[in-house]
Amino acid sequence: MKRKFFGTDGIRGTVGVPPITPDFVLKLGFALGSVLRNGYNKNKVLIGKDTRISGYMFESALQAGLSASGMDIRLLGPMPTPAIAYLTRTFHAVAGIVISASHNPFQDNGIKFFSGEGKKLSDEIELTIEAEMEKQMQTVAPDQLGKVERIEDAAGRYIEFCKSTIPYDVTLKGLKIVVDCANGATYHVAPSVFRELGASVETIGTQPNGLNINAGYGATQPQALQTAVLYQNADLGIALDGDGDRVLMVDANGDIVDGDELLFIIAQARHKAGTLQGAVVGTVMSNLGLEQALDKKGIPFKRAAVGDRYVLEMLQQTGGNLGGESSGHVICLDRTTTGDGIITALQVLAASIQMGLPLHILKTGMQKCPQLMINVPITPGLDIISQPSIQDAVKEAEQQLNNQGRVLLRKSGTEPLIRVMVEGINRTEVETVAHQLAEVVKAAVC
């Protein structure tokens, strides 16, 4: 069955526009509680959020819905998405809820869920929740209503967990790092992690006001970090996104190190140490250069559909412990259950220290193939990829690349966009083909 509300990463959209409205979120909380109480005794659900101003409103709506279903609630306040996954496990909660639209601007918000194991909910459970929302709300008896408590030491717990994911004898002493928190959920967590491990830390994007999340800072806009690294004469920079589940890094030369390169650096370090298990998992968007670099080292590579949930599923199916996306969603499954920007950065830093090589040298083992992605806005819900004119244009683009590249069109699971990706050997040819294909898609949208 096709999901009505859930996308690749929960439910997301513009605040005040259905389904991202208080009444919908109230009913969503009730539906989640009703589904999870089926077969369970009264249990607790954790709620965390990023720094968007609308988070207050949706936090209250979720509380009301969950309480009406008979679920107890534990509030975490502003916390990174992966922290909520971790704390859901350690508190033995039945589920964790994140109020966030990740890397989107403040006008958007969303709701995503973790199971009691700290993993994304399965498609089956999401469909069950959607089916429950079709029913009339029936509040439990007054003596069965859920209670609400706030967890005051959530940040400290998560900081200690992050620090524990690298060997005890690895210190960041002597490193100067610039950390960009995108004015998001990591603003009060990430700097402490790196400082407590010995690094000298400068920060940007750590003054959230409810309206400036991801605005000019963070993993989707790393230019400010590039400038800061050069100005501060730092060894490297770390750019997190608004909810902290993705990361990009900047080397001492001010050059960006993207998710594919981070994945390669961690993979080669673990391969050398003998701790890499199974195939490294990327996605259909992963650069061909990553696959080629891993192949040279004898490391198998597999591609999953776009979305960290699908990367995780393939890791579990194949017995792997490392996977991720070009965007910087990296899953170190032997450390945690979901993409975690802070933990990913720590694994890269540990690899750099243990191998005795700086970031700009470590990434040279992988040569990226020229790749261009163009986002074409569409009307929400519009499906044009299957149109004959689009399919013909894709075949023509593949012929132009002479079977020495890749063409991919996909509908974004988080934004009303068609992503047009072209990859090949010659940069000029890649750019020409990508723009030609994007124009065909734009014409079809109109």
Image (cartoon, rainbow, N blue to C red):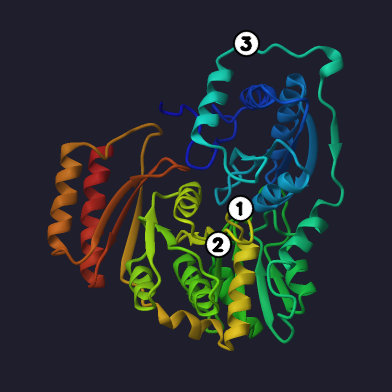
Asked whether residue 274 is in view, the answer is yes
Question: Is 131 or 109 nearer to us in this picture?
Answer: 131
Residue occupied by mark 2: 219
Residue at image coords 57%, 38%: 121
Residue occupied by mark 1: 337
Q: On screen, 358 above or below 167? A: below
- Residue type at the position of mark 1: Thr
Question: Is 276 or 304 nearer to us in this picture?
Answer: 276
**Where does residue 142 sit, x and y in percent of width and height?**
84, 13
Among the two numbered marks 2 and 3 on one chain, the one whose residue lies closer to the N terminus: 3
Question: Is 266 or 21 nearer to us in this picture?
Answer: 266
| Label 3 close to label 1 by CB (< 8 Å) | no
Q: On screen, 234 above or below 437? A: below
Among the two numbered marks 2 and 1 on one chain, the one whose residue lies closer to the N terminus: 2
Give how far apart the Cα atoms at labels 2 and 3 are.
41 Å
Tell me, for residue 136, which label it has, or none. 3
**Where does residue 130 sit, x and y in percent of width and height?**
54, 24
Q: On screen, 305 above or below 172? A: above
Image quadrant assignment for residue 424: bottom left
Residue at image coords 69%, 82%: 176
- Residue type at the position of mark 2: Ala
- Residue type at the position of mark 3: Gln
